[in-house]
Image (cartoon, rainbow, N blue to C red):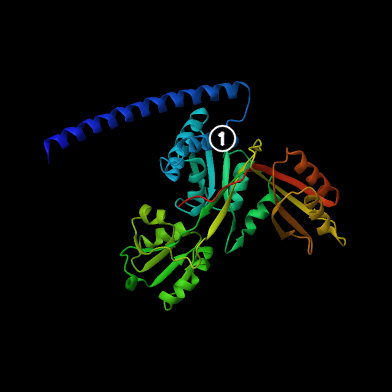
Amino acid sequence: MDESLLKRLGELRKRIDRIDIEIVLLLKERLSMAFEIGKAKADARQDMFDLGREQEVMDNILRDNAGAFPPAVLKVIFSEIISACRNAQRPSKVGFFGPETTFTHMAATRFFGHAPCFVPLNTITDVFEEVERGRVDFGVVPMENSIEGTVSLTLDGFCEFKVKVCGEIYLPISHDLMSQSGRIDNIRRILSHPHAIAQCRMWLQKNLPAVPVEEFVSTAQAARWAAVDPSVAAIASPLAASTYNLQTVARHIEDFAGNTTRFLVLGLECQKPSGNDKTSILLSLEDRPGSLYQLLEPLAKRGINLTKIQSRPVKNEPWRYLFYVDIAGHIDDPKVKEGVDAIKEGCAFLEWLGSYPQGSLAED
């Protein structure tokens, strides 16, 4: 290599080394400031978790960056920085449905970063219970999939437990087929969660029509089984392949592009207004003509966007239904509060489940 080029590269690398040292010093200073903020919040008995402030920080960073540094990468970097600084204020525990490497686990780390202590739980009901009893600070559960629809057990959880929704995550879902060898002709059985199987059914029928497909409790458990049985393949997340040392047979075998799951973050406290919020309520209508219209009319009159309405039968009360409703805006917004109050007048029961910043579609 040319001597002048070697000299030039050496100078540039020294500059990078100095920049890296400056970055580390600034990170240490930021962590120290976060610790001081945590002490001040503790003295004032304020909640350590402030999604609105964290979103403001991220928006400022992306705006100042103006696209110079890849925005998706910058979001990941600062999500982890914010996560570490938040954890310095007060270490937190986050419960999530399913073992590690499931999509719910991925959604939890996408939302909170990797600094908190993550606690895998066996059922969605367990997540609700652990949050309500204060054994974890937050919980993450799947709410709905763009193809398979609403997760009924999550709706049931809101009926049985006193928790608040304090965040949401939209996670693109990508399913891979994986096994020990990575060879399609070695597969004798395919295992996965029922939702994952349903989302890949056409691909399986086209490419492996004679191979039996069996339902498993989770995609992660299916991957674990494939790791010990060379005749088994699992449908699971790309993270599961690296975690359990499996080889990918085929990538992105989901039948429809744009497959996305919405996850909810559960807690005991509601978030402050961020300027781009969503409010969730649970209600039961009076059994009389026009009751559903009376639900929608107060929102329409005030120009409030209803983003979701889902009915769920009430257990042990045949032909009675609860409705889960999402509307745009925060309960502290006068217009939203008036609309919810007007709805309440025509309801047999109404409970506010929380107001929280609206999530955005995450990048792969």
Question: Is 61 or 166 nearer to us in this picture?
Answer: 61
- Point 78% across, 46% down: residue: 340
Q: Farthest residue to the bottom: give it.
A: 210
- Point 41% across, 56% down: residue: 238
Label 1: element kind: helix
In the image, residue 354 above or below residue 244 = above
In the image, residue 249 above or below residue 32 = below
Which corner quadrant holds the N terminus?
A: top left
Question: Is 334 or 196 nearer to us in this picture?
Answer: 334
Amino acid carrying mark 1 in the image: Glu
Q: Quadrant of residue 244?
A: bottom left
Residue 208 in sight in this render = no
- On the image, the x and y values in percent for residue 15 come to 27, 29
How would you rate the neighbour count of disc 1 (Cα within 10 Å): few for under 14, some for 14-19, many for 20 or more?
Answer: few
Question: Is 185 or 27 nearer to us in this picture?
Answer: 27
Give the residue pinned by disc 1. 56
Is residue 28 rendered to the left or right of residue 218? left
- On the image, the x and y values in percent for residue 142 come to 57, 53
Residue 204 in sight in this render = yes
- On the image, the x and y values in percent for residue 336 come to 75, 43
